[in-house]
Image (cartoon, grey):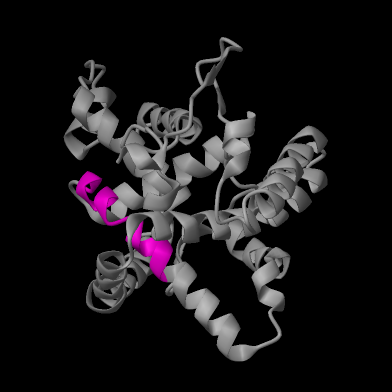
Amino acid sequence: MNALSLYIPFTPSINPRLSGLATVLALGMVLGGGLLPVGAQAEEAAGEPVQEQPQQQEQVVQTVAVDEVDPWQGFNRRMFAFNDVTDRYLLRPLAIGYKTIMPDPLERGVSNIFNNVMEVPSIINGSLQGNFSGAAYYSGRLLVNTTLGLGGLLDVAQHMNLPARDREDFGQTLAVWGVNAGPYVVLPFLGPSTVRDGFARPVDWYADPTTYIDHVRTENTVLGVSILNTRASLLELEKNLTGDKYTFIRDAYLQRREYLIHNGEIEDSFGTGESFEFEDFDSEEF
């Protein structure tokens, strides 16, 4: 579920950087004979050329890439199944009910309020990353929407040449500081993550202004509405899930994180030194 909210156009494969590294490792093992079938090794020893099928080579590359990025796949798939059952029988029905009773304008207003609040962590993390122009941009949106937008109910800033941008979080900040992502991991209830992003989550919680609501019932209500509002916004996106849901969401999450960390600029993995910029998806188009 979480990965869908982070969706951008992507190819259903491991990140190109990982694939490139995996290619080198796999080819090295193949050329060394470590992954050749017994019959092929015998032919090679006899001096006869060995013909590797392209599909076999591609499978080796993909296997090494997956092993590097998702070494805990057995655990992750079990946790994914647990989260999926929880969502199917609890969260999704509640989200459908929420969307049914909420008028569209009010639902958009609630989304705007939460988006406005989350400008605060983006300001903090933008500053920590040394991206002061970005921090100023988020500050401008927060100021405009909090005042002219009735506490964030209306997104007035988008009509003042300040459209919404992707959020900045502490996981991205750690990446900018050079901290490696580590293995992919599926967390109970929280969904897809990496070791780096998992350790960053508590910092994000403390940076969220709603954490400091000093009234338990109000805090729980805000949290519940936030969860239902987010889940309801993903109902239409479920149509994009095809094939192995676990693999789809894992790849979507990892590639989306790369996109966010590099602010939409993905370097050329073929060594040409070029970079490519991708426009972010507008979730309202789905």
- Of 220 and 38, nearer the camera is 220
The C terminus - image quarter? top left
Q: Position of residue 200 (x, y in %)?
A: 66, 61
| Total marks placed | 0
Q: Position of residue 189 (x, y in %)?
A: 42, 74
- Of 256 and 246, nearer the camera is 256
Q: Above or below — where is 38 with respect to 20? A: below
The N terminus - image quarter? bottom left
- Kindly report the secondary structure that dominates the magenta region of the rendered protein: helix
Q: Above or below — where is 54 with respect to 117? A: above
Q: Is residue 133 visible?
A: yes
Whether 236 is among the magenta residues is: yes
The answer to which quarter of the image holds residue 227 is bottom left
Left or right: 182 as drawn, with respect to 140: left
Left or right: 284 as drawn, with respect to 172: left
Specify the segment rendered in magenta: 228-241
| Residue beneath the point at 64% across and 32% down | 160
The answer to which quarter of the image holds residue 39 is top left
Q: Position of residue 135 (x, y in %)?
A: 77, 42
Whether 92 is among the magenta residues is: no
Q: Position of residue 117 (x, y in %)?
A: 64, 59
- Of 163 and 156, nearer the camera is 156
Q: Is residue 2 visible?
A: no
- Of 248 and 76, nearer the camera is 248
| Residue beneath the point at 30% across and 50% down | 247
Q: Above or below — where is 170 with respect to 89? A: above
